[in-house]
Image (cartoon, rainbow, N blue to C red):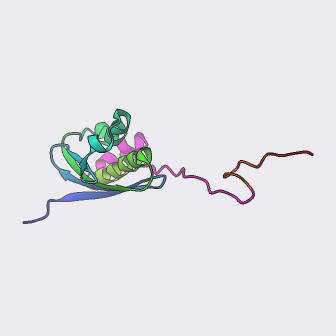
Amino acid sequence: MAEPKYTYGTGKRKTAIARVKLLAGNGSIVVNDRPFQEYFPSLALQNVVLEPLKVTGTIGKLDARVKVEGGGVMGQAGALRHGIARALVESDEGLRSVLRQYGLLTRDARIKERKKYGLKRARKAPQYTKR
Protein backbone atom coordinates (compact mmCIF):
# COMPACT_ATOMS: atom_id res chain seq x y z
CA MET A 1 0.00 0.00 0.00
CA ALA A 2 1.36 3.45 -0.93
CA GLU A 3 2.05 6.04 1.77
CA PRO A 4 -0.51 8.89 1.56
CA LYS A 5 0.84 12.19 0.17
CA TYR A 6 1.79 14.66 2.87
CA THR A 7 3.62 17.94 3.30
CA TYR A 8 6.16 18.49 6.02
CA GLY A 9 6.97 21.52 8.19
CA THR A 10 9.25 22.12 11.17
CA GLY A 11 8.25 24.73 13.73
CA LYS A 12 10.31 26.15 16.57
CA ARG A 13 9.59 28.35 19.58
CA LYS A 14 11.89 28.86 22.60
CA THR A 15 13.34 25.35 23.11
CA ALA A 16 10.38 23.45 21.63
CA ILE A 17 10.53 21.78 18.21
CA ALA A 18 7.46 20.49 16.35
CA ARG A 19 7.68 18.20 13.31
CA VAL A 20 4.39 18.45 11.40
CA LYS A 21 2.99 16.22 8.63
CA LEU A 22 -0.12 17.59 6.88
CA LEU A 23 -2.37 15.16 4.98
CA ALA A 24 -5.73 15.56 3.27
CA GLY A 25 -8.44 14.53 5.73
CA ASN A 26 -11.22 15.66 8.03
CA GLY A 27 -9.37 18.00 10.40
CA SER A 28 -7.98 15.67 13.08
CA ILE A 29 -4.74 16.77 14.74
CA VAL A 30 -2.71 14.14 16.60
CA VAL A 31 0.14 15.36 18.83
CA ASN A 32 2.56 12.72 20.17
CA ASP A 33 -0.04 9.98 19.47
CA ARG A 34 -2.76 11.84 21.44
CA PRO A 35 -5.62 14.04 20.18
CA PHE A 36 -4.54 17.67 20.36
CA GLN A 37 -7.52 18.60 22.60
CA GLU A 38 -6.14 16.15 25.14
CA TYR A 39 -2.51 17.28 24.72
CA PHE A 40 -3.46 21.01 24.96
CA PRO A 41 -6.49 21.04 27.31
CA SER A 42 -6.52 24.86 27.54
CA LEU A 43 -8.80 26.55 25.00
CA ALA A 44 -6.27 29.39 24.56
CA LEU A 45 -3.54 26.91 23.53
CA GLN A 46 -5.94 25.14 21.16
CA ASN A 47 -6.69 28.49 19.49
CA VAL A 48 -2.94 29.16 19.11
CA VAL A 49 -2.50 25.78 17.38
CA LEU A 50 -5.50 26.25 15.05
CA GLU A 51 -4.68 29.85 14.04
CA PRO A 52 -2.88 29.05 10.74
CA LEU A 53 -5.73 26.75 9.67
CA LYS A 54 -8.36 29.38 10.58
CA VAL A 55 -6.76 32.27 8.68
CA THR A 56 -6.25 30.13 5.54
CA GLY A 57 -9.71 28.54 5.69
CA THR A 58 -8.31 25.00 5.66
CA ILE A 59 -9.72 23.97 9.06
CA GLY A 60 -11.56 20.65 8.73
CA LYS A 61 -9.87 19.83 5.40
CA LEU A 62 -6.42 18.68 6.56
CA ASP A 63 -5.18 16.17 9.12
CA ALA A 64 -1.96 16.82 11.04
CA ARG A 65 0.39 14.24 12.56
CA VAL A 66 2.79 15.96 14.95
CA LYS A 67 5.82 15.04 17.05
CA VAL A 68 6.69 17.81 19.49
CA GLU A 69 9.50 17.86 22.06
CA GLY A 70 11.27 20.25 24.39
CA GLY A 71 10.05 23.37 26.16
CA GLY A 72 6.79 23.89 28.01
CA VAL A 73 3.19 23.76 26.82
CA MET A 74 3.12 27.38 25.56
CA GLY A 75 6.38 26.95 23.66
CA GLN A 76 5.16 23.66 22.20
CA ALA A 77 1.87 25.25 21.07
CA GLY A 78 3.82 28.09 19.43
CA ALA A 79 6.17 25.62 17.73
CA LEU A 80 3.19 23.63 16.47
CA ARG A 81 1.57 26.80 15.07
CA HIS A 82 4.82 27.69 13.27
CA GLY A 83 5.18 24.13 11.90
CA ILE A 84 1.60 24.02 10.60
CA ALA A 85 2.07 27.39 8.89
CA ARG A 86 5.29 26.21 7.21
CA ALA A 87 3.66 22.95 6.08
CA LEU A 88 0.70 24.90 4.62
CA VAL A 89 3.10 27.04 2.56
CA GLU A 90 4.86 23.86 1.42
CA SER A 91 1.52 22.46 0.19
CA ASP A 92 0.20 25.69 -1.37
CA GLU A 93 2.51 28.64 -2.10
CA GLY A 94 -0.53 30.91 -2.52
CA LEU A 95 -1.16 30.83 1.25
CA ARG A 96 2.22 32.47 1.99
CA SER A 97 0.91 36.07 1.76
CA VAL A 98 -2.01 35.40 4.15
CA LEU A 99 0.19 33.62 6.70
CA ARG A 100 2.88 36.31 6.42
CA GLN A 101 0.23 39.01 6.98
CA TYR A 102 -0.74 37.38 10.29
CA GLY A 103 2.92 36.89 11.26
CA LEU A 104 2.64 33.10 11.38
CA LEU A 105 5.74 32.35 9.28
CA THR A 106 8.11 34.42 11.42
CA ARG A 107 10.22 32.38 13.83
CA ASP A 108 9.92 33.99 17.28
CA ALA A 109 13.63 34.27 18.14
CA ARG A 110 13.15 35.17 21.82
CA ILE A 111 14.91 32.56 23.91
CA LYS A 112 16.11 32.55 27.51
CA GLU A 113 19.26 34.59 28.03
CA ARG A 114 22.21 32.73 29.55
CA LYS A 115 23.32 33.33 33.14
CA LYS A 116 26.51 35.41 33.51
CA TYR A 117 29.17 34.70 36.12
CA GLY A 118 29.14 37.00 39.14
CA LEU A 119 25.38 37.53 38.74
CA LYS A 120 22.42 35.70 40.24
CA ARG A 121 20.56 35.42 36.91
CA ALA A 122 21.20 36.75 33.40
CA ARG A 123 21.15 40.38 34.61
CA LYS A 124 20.28 40.43 38.33
CA ALA A 125 23.32 41.49 40.34
CA PRO A 126 23.90 40.56 44.00
CA GLN A 127 22.74 43.17 46.49
CA TYR A 128 25.21 46.05 46.87
CA THR A 129 26.39 46.82 50.42
CA LYS A 130 28.17 50.11 51.07
CA ARG A 131 29.64 49.12 54.44
* Residue with the most extreme bottom position: 1
Query: Image point 83% across, 46% down: which residue?
Result: 128
* Residue with the most extreme left position: 1
Residue 37 located within the stretch drawn in magenta: no
* Residue with the most extreme top position: 43
Bounds of the magenta segment: 90-118
Corner quadrant of residue 68 = bottom left
Query: Image point 20% across, 46% down: which residue?
Result: 62
Left or right of 89, for residue 125 = right
Left or right of 109, for residue 80 = left
Residue 96 located within the stretch drawn in magenta: yes
Which x, y percent locates residue 77? 38, 45
- How many numbered circles are shown? 0
Which x, y percent locates residue 101? 41, 40
Left or right of 26, for residue 42 = right
Query: Image point 42% across, 56% down: which residue?
Result: 70
Which x, y percent locates residue 97? 37, 45
Task: Confirm whether residue 119 shows in the render.
Answer: yes
Judge by depth and name the residue closer to the eye, 42 or 6: 42
Task: Confirm whether residue 18 shows in the render.
Answer: no
| Quadrant placement of the N terminus | bottom left
Which x, y percent locates residue 100? 40, 45
